[in-house]
Amino acid sequence: MQFILVFYIISFTCIAYHLPVFTWTTILIASSLYFPALAWEISRKIKAPQDENQYTTYSKILGNKPAVITVLVVLLAQLVSLGIVVYPLSTVAVGLLALVYVGVVWASLVYMSNPVRFSYGKVARIYIYLVQAVLIATEILLIVRGQGQ
């Protein structure tokens, strides 16, 4: 449902500016907005083995490491879709986004080696905040340069 909701919101902008709604670009943008929400939804339901209870979690269903790997795959899909959209605007931003992804991979490896150290849900939240910071800074720089919308 989240993907449909994101596309619905994008359609308002497309209609307002008389742009086609269903294009490769809008699909990539919708995906770029959807994947972090999916990753957060999965990551918040990953618990260390000793913290599991009667509540059904992805770590209980898939196992701790496969659940974390699932989040990494979803975030990689987001990085790819976002990278395709952002690359024409700023190669530096794409590099920063890749660096943020490397950070989430590192944090995930730390978590998988010792799940007691921290709650994995925080990893996805921090990733989302950092990606948004890169995108906002990129847009501000483009506007200052007279290239942004």
Image (cartoon, grey):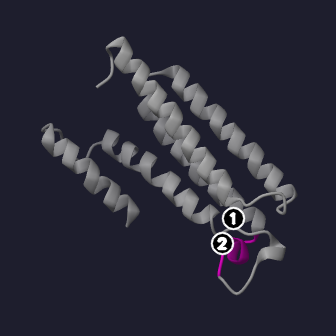
Residue at x 59% of width, y 28% of height? 96
Which stretch appears magenta? 56-63
**Mark 2 Cα shell of 10 Å, populated few (<14), some (14-19), many (≥20):** many
Location of mark 1 (residue): 67
Q: Quadrant of the C terminus?
A: top left
Residue at x 32% of width, y 13% of height? 146
Q: Quadrant of residue 144?
A: top left
The kind of residue tagged 1 is Ala
Is the residue 80 above or below the residue 143 in the image? below
Is the residue 107 above or below the residue 83 in the image? below
| Separation of residues labelled 2 and 1 (CA atoms) | 6 Å
Choose between 28 and 37: the one closer to the eye: 37
* Residue 70 appears anywhere in the view: yes
**Mark 1 Cα shell of 10 Å, populated few (<14), some (14-19), many (≥20):** many
Location of mark 2 (residue): 58
Q: Quadrant of the N terminus?
A: bottom left
